[in-house]
């Protein structure tokens, strides 16, 4: 078994776990060529072996390899990153899956996440905007203290149809969260979702809820469940 204490050793280990079918699947989902096609569960398994190694995580991130970046989000110490470092890492994200892990495991628990959210919501970089809307959706789910929901809805109505796909996902999550958590805006949210039509034909397995806002909001309200992350 290759060493998992060096970048080269980890890359070799990841490559050995790669799968051609998964590489093709990842590529269709927008992953760059620098990826091995490793299952997410296998990456989590390697992270459990390494535990926390902040310096190694930073070196892994710098490789630009998809799996190395995914692994880095699991073994670094978010609080040891400066806001500038978090910003730089967010902007050098390689694909949506990496962005999701970065936003969930690093950005969401960073001490300066609120300041970063305000900065990113004014940005034009697709990954910064995706992160900004991710944090905004989380704020909405937590009660929306300090947020102007009416202004957010006007912005979503204006920007969502033409936004980059990477941004549309978390912007749509914010729209859905407003409809689920804030009954006074629910009908407006549903009407916006219908008018925009984003993810209307999204394929889902039986029993799953699609990200199409009108269906998603009504289903979640009926179930009394938690909104999409």
Image: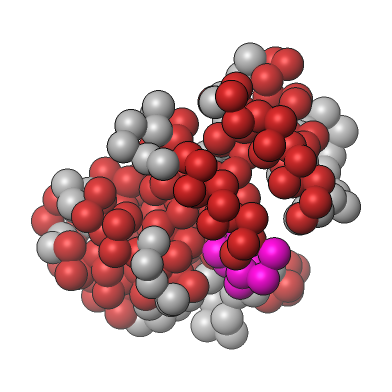
Q: Which of 168 and 203 is in front in this view?
A: 168
Residue 15 shows up from this direction: no
**Is residue 35 shown to the viewer in this render?**
yes
Magenta-span inclusion, residue 128: no
Q: Quadrant of the N terminus?
A: bottom left
Residue depicted at x 55% and y 64%: 167
Residue at the image position 27 percent from the left and 69 percent from the top? 87
Where does the image place residue 128, in percent across and percent down from the top left?
Answer: 40, 68
Which percent across, then down, holds residue 122?
A: 37, 67
Residue stretch in magenta: 161-168
Q: Where is residue 199 in the image (x, y as percent from the top left)?
A: 78, 53
Q: In this view, does 214 lie above or below 45?
A: above
Is residue 170 toward the left or the right of residue 28 in the image?
left
Where in the figure is residue 47, as x and y percent of width and height? 35, 52
Q: In this view, does 173 lie to the left or right of 206?
A: left
Q: Residue at x 55, y 35 (%)?
A: 178
Q: How many marks?
A: 0
């Amino acid at each position: 078994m290759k060493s998992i204490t060096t970048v080269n050793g980890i890359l070799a280990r990841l490559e050995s776990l790669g799968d051609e079918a998964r590489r093709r699947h990842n590529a269709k989902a927008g992953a760059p060529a620098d990826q091995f096609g490793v299952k997410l569960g296998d990456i989590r398994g390697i992270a459990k072996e390494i535990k926390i190694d902040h310096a190694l995580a930073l070196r892994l991130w710098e490789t630009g390899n998809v799996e190395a970046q995914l692994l880095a989000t699991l073994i670094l110490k978010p609080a040891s990153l400066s806001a500038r470092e978090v910003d730089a890492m967010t902007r050098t994200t390689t694909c949506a899956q990496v962005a999701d892990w970065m936003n969930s495991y690093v950005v969401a628990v960073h001490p300066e996440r609120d300041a970063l959210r305000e900065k990113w919501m004014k940005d034009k970089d697709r990954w910064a905007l995706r992160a900004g809307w991710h944090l905004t959706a989380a704020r909405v789910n937590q009660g929306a203290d300090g947020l102007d929901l009416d202004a957010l809805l006007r912005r979503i109505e204006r920007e969502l149809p033409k936004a980059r796909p990477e941004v549309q996902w978390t912007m749509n999550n914010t729209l859905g969260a407003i409809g689920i958590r804030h009954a006074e805006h629910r009908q407006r949210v549903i009407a916006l979702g219908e008018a925009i039509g984003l993810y209307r034909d999204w394929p889902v397995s039986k029993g799953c809820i699609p990200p199409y806002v009108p269906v998603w909001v009504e289903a979640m309200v009926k179930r009394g469940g938690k909104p999409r992350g």
